Image (cartoon, rainbow, N blue to C red):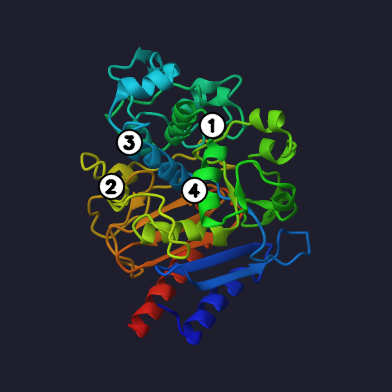
């Protein structure tokens, strides 16, 4: 599999054009596309590391990938499911590992708290059907958190202690569910989530620039975070997940004090993240090293629709409860004709071929406007990375669609 020089040039121009006006366009973006054989079909950075930095963005720079972390946590959890250490559908086992969940309450629309009526399972956590939300996306949950508030990116476990928005298994809500899956993993294996991921996922793939506690070298290459105002102008701003960037990475006690967020805690080079996507393309094995992370049947399960009872889950929309962090989103990945929507284990499943992708393609995003996709049928995956808030930035969405569409056009030309 390869893209011809014409297609490569076309994608490069798309990325360069998106970053041509950093103040009103995008300050910088990195795009990586990989094939089933593990080789890169495209890898390019454009723009600058950050407005005011004057430093060109390169493939060596590191992004906070936020919710793109969820897929990695899903791989980690499913490794332990294969070994019998974690159980997908045993609520008593999960709540034995996480006793805090036994007495967690359900926050009703009127503000009252009610007892939950069943145990939470790992499958519920990985499919966002346990009931947890984010204060970013839920006015009801944010109002409940006042006056102190909740900060899901504080780097503190305490901010994971919030009520559910519905009874377990009775709805879909995007939230801290996969953070709790990571907590269960830590307690099941007696290791921090970051240490587990390093030893069992990243090191076997030769990846050294992905971590929840960035090394000094990673920090020196960190991309600036930006905010877009209502007039479309960008300014640099502080990172949301600051604590891991301030502790001494070489001090075990300091690093141990940082909550390892399975839902949003990873910093990474895009090229390294895309190597993980090649493992999913190859049914759980790395095409470059031959290292197997998961069984094929496990990857098949991750890409199976887990929530057929909620075919319109993405059409309930996302509230801009914190407008500095997210725009309102009327529908997740809208598709003409409103076909049933699917969700696998930690990511959305495509129900559209609008860009050329196959039905059942896995895809998801990260809060500062990062987007990845993994098409097992056609053997291609990719990632578009920026560091721009609020979420669902129209210019990044436009870049993602243009890049992905051009990739599939190029593959079709070579078929």
Q: Secondary structure at mark 3?
A: loop
Closer to the chain start, of discs 4 and 1, is: 1
Closer to the chain start, of discs 3 and 4, is: 3
Does 8 appear above or below 55?
below
Disc 3 and disc 4: Cα gap in Å? 28 Å
Check disc 1 and report the residue beneath it: 191
Q: Cβ–Cβ below 8 Å for labels 3 and 2?
A: no
Check disc 2 and report the residue beneath it: 301
Q: Cβ–Cβ below 8 Å for labels 4 and 1?
A: no
Disc 4 and disc 1: Cα gap in Å? 14 Å
Q: Nearer the viewer, mark 3 or mark 2?
A: 2
Disc 2 and disc 1: Cα gap in Å? 25 Å
Check disc 3 and report the residue beneath it: 172
57 relative position to 355: left or right = right
Judge the density around disc 3: few (<14), some (14-19), many (≥20) Cα neighbours within 10 Å: many
> Which x, y percent locates residue 36?
39, 68
Does 155 appear above or below 314?
above
Q: Cβ–Cβ below 8 Å for labels 3 and 4?
A: no
> Which x, y percent locates residue 406?
43, 75
Closer to the chain start, of discs 3 and 2, is: 3
Closer to the chain start, of discs 2 and 4, is: 4
- Residue 167 in sight from this viewpoint: no
Q: Nearer the viewer, mark 2 or mark 1?
A: 1
Check disc 4 and report the residue beneath it: 201
Residue 325 badge: none
Quarter of the rendering occupied by the N terminus: bottom left
């Amino acid at each position: 599999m390869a893209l011809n020089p014409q297609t490569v040039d076309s994608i490069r121009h798309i990325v360069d054009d998106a970053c041509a006006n950093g103040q009103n366009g995008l300050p910088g973006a990195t795009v990586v596309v990989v094939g089933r054989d593990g080789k890169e079909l495209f890898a390019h950075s454009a723009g600058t590391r950050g407005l005011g930095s004057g430093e060109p963005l390169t493939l060596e720079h590191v992004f906070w990938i936020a919710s793109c972390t969820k897929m990695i946590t899903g791989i980690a959890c499913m490794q332990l499911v294969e070994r019998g250490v974690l159980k997908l559908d045993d609520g008593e086992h999960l709540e034995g590992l996480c006793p805090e969940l036994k007495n967690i309450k359900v926050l009703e629309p009127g503000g009252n708290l009610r007892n939950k009526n069943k145990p939470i399972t790992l499958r519920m956590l990985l499919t966002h059907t346990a009931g947890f939300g984010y204060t970013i996306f839920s006015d009801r949950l944010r109002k409940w958190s006042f006056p102190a508030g909740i900060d899901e990116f504080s780097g503190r476990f305490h901010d994971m202690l919030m009520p559910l928005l519905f009874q377990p298994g009775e709805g879909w809500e995007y939230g801290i569910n996969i953070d709790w899956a990571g907590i269960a993993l830590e307690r099941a294996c007696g290791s921090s989530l970051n240490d587990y991921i390093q030893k069992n996922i990243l090191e076997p793939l030769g990846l050294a620039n992905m971590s929840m506690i960035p090394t000094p070298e990673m920090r020196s290459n960190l991309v600036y975070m930006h905010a877009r105002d209502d007039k479309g102008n960008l300014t640099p701003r502080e990172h949301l997940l600051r604590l891991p960037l301030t502790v001494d990475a070489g001090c075990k006690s300091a690093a141990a004090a940082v909550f390892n967020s399975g839902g949003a805690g990873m910093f990474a080079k895009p090229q390294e993240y895309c190597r993980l996507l090649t493992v999913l393309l190859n049914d759980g094995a790395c095409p470059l090293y031959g290292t197997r992370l998961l069984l094929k049947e496990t990857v098949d399960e991750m890409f199976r629709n887990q929530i057929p009872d909620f075919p319109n889950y993405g059409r309930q929309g996302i509230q801009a409860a914190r407008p500095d962090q997210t725009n309102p989103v009327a529908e997740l990945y809208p598709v003409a004709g409103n076909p049933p929507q699917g969700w696998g284990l930690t990511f959305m499943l495509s129900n559209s071929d609008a860009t050329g992708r196959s039905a059942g393609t896995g895809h998801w995003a990260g809060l500062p406007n990062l987007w990845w996709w993994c098409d097992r049928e056609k053997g291609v995956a990719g990632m578009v990375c920026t560091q721009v808030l609020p979420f669902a930035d129209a210019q990044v969405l436009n870049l993602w669609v243009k890049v992905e569409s051009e990739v599939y056009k190029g593959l079709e030309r070579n078929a």
